[in-house]
Amino acid sequence: MESSQILLIKLLKDNGYSVTTPRLLVFEMLYTYGLQTIGQLIKRCSPCDRASIYRSVQLLENLGAVNRIPQGFKYKLELSEIFLPHHHHIVCNQCGRHTDIEQSKLEDLLMNIAEHEGYKLTSHKVELSGLCPVCNKG
């Protein structure tokens, strides 16, 4: 995590922002726990106040350090590909469990689709949903 934290500090300073305790704490909790709701993040960032956490998340999103992952009418947050390898998620519709998936065949397929349509693929997001193994029993 140390090299990632150094990268975050550089990102903040290069864009004219201070390195603050809430910003570092938001980063640390996202790095440690991965994909999570804003509510979970706020609880984990105690004793920082809710407003500081929201402001920190917004700034980190604007700088491209944090991604907002839509899940139905809600969303979860995670660190961006600046800090984590590229991956996708599969989320359980019933319990909300999520699993990161990395699939090279999927990446190749998406590149081929883009090329077939005459595009050069620069980014993409794929989110899968269904029932996890536990919820599927029954």
Image (cartoon, rainbow, N blue to C red):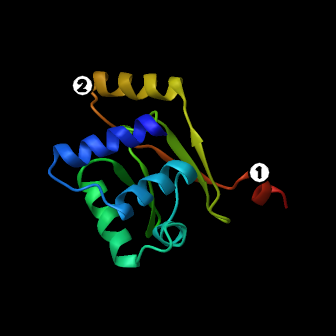
Give the residue at x 33% y 44%.
8
Relative horizontal placement of residue 55, taking residue 46 as reference (left or right): left
Q: Using the image, tell me which numbered label, if any, was put on residue 133.
A: 1
Q: Quadrant of residue 116?
A: top left
- Residue 22 or 103: which is nearer the viewer? 22
Relative horizontal placement of residue 58, taking residue 2 as reference (left or right): left
Q: What is the three-letter code of the residue carrying label 2?
A: Lys
Give the residue at x 36% y 51%.
66
Residue 47, how many percent across, how many down?
48, 74
Mark 1: secondary structure = helix
- Residue 134 or 79: which is nearer the viewer? 79
- The residue carrying pointer 2 sits among few (fewer than 14), some (14 to 19) or many (20 or more) residues within 10 Å by Cα, namely few
Give the residue at x 76% y 60%.
135
Residue 18, how many percent across, how many down?
23, 56
Name the outermost residue toward the right.
138
Instruction: Give yes or no for contact between labels 1 and 2 (Cβ–Cβ under 8 Å).
Output: no
Q: What is the three-letter code of the residue carrying label 1?
A: Pro
Relative horizontal placement of residue 84, taking residue 52 as reference (left or right): right
- Residue 64 or 90: which is nearer the viewer? 64
Residue 133, how many percent across, how many down?
77, 51
Q: Using the image, tell me which numbered label, if any, was put on residue 120.
A: 2
